[in-house]
């Protein structure tokens, strides 16, 4: 079994229960498959699937069974027609949602692995930044009388001593 063959099997229940799969949409899908790919859906089969005396859900279920029996290419062309005529249903298919979710999950793991060193969070950063800004303000406005004791071993004090000795 191919990829589209399996997808159609898993998406059939969703397609048959979705309210957006109305008579007009099913007719458009049948016409596209019949006109563009007559080897997939002959005129006689298309007429059977467009019979308005049969409820739409029954016709759709029969169409999906028929395409499933036809094989991989028929399933692929059905998905292509569905994508052309109604992208919102196509993108909400369970098989499409699973693919999207697996891509998002992979992206999240890569993101977490990339920033392992930053696991302390934003509050740690803000507290460190606030502390440094406080020291800078104290140094700027307080002069050496306030910060002299505190900065005696810091790089600022060492660089100041180096400038004084020149």
Image: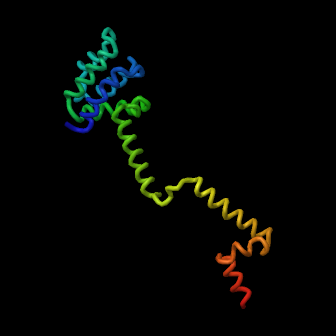
The front one of 27 and 105 is 105
User: Picture coordinates of residue 91 (x, y %)?
Assistant: 41, 34
Q: Is 46 on the left-hand or right-hand side of 149?
A: left
User: Picture coordinates of residue 61 (x, y %)?
Assistant: 28, 20
User: Picture coordinates of residue 163 (x, y %)?
Assistant: 71, 85
Quarter of the image where one finds residue 15:
top left
Quarter of the image where one finds residue 128:
bottom right
The front one of 71 and 162 is 162
Residue reaching furthest front?
149
Q: Is 14 on the left-hand or right-hand side of 73?
A: right
Residue for point 72% across, 67% down: 136
Residue for point 29% across, 17% down: 59
- In this rendering, is residue 73 above or below 60? below
Residue reaching furthest bottom?
166
User: Picture coordinates of residue 147 (x, y %)?
Assistant: 74, 72
Instruction: Give the total number of marks visible in the rendering.
Output: 0
- In this rendering, is residue 27 above or below 90? above
Quarter of the image where one finds residue 103:
top left
Q: How is the image coloured?
A: rainbow
- In this rendering, is residue 21 above or below 96? above
Q: Quadrant of the C terminus?
A: bottom right
Q: Is 47 on the left-hand or right-hand side of 128?
A: left
Residue for point 31% across, 30% down: 78
- In this rendering, is residue 57 above or below 136? above
The front one of 100 and 67 is 100
């Amino acid at each position: 079994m191919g990829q589209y063959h399996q997808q159609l099997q898993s998406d059939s229940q969703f397609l048959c229960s979705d309210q957006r799969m109305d008579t007009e949409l099913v007719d458009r899908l049948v016409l596209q498959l019949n006109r563009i790919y007559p080897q997939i859906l002959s005129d006689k089969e298309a007429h059977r699937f467009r019979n308005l005396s049969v409820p739409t859900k029954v016709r759709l279920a029969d169409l999906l069974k028929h395409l499933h029996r036809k094989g991989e290419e028929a399933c692929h062309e059905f998905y292509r027609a569905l994508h052309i005529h109604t992208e919102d249903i196509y993108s909400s298919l369970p098989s499409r949602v699973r693919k999207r979710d697996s891509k998002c999950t992979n992206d999240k793991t890569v993101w977490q692995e990339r920033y392992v060193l930053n696991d302390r969070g934003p509050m740690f950063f803000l507290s460190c930044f606030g502390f440094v800004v406080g020291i800078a303000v104290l140094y700027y406005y307080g002069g050496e009388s306030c910060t002299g004791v505190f900065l005696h071993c810091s790089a600022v004090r060492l660089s100041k001593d180096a400038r004084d000795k020149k």
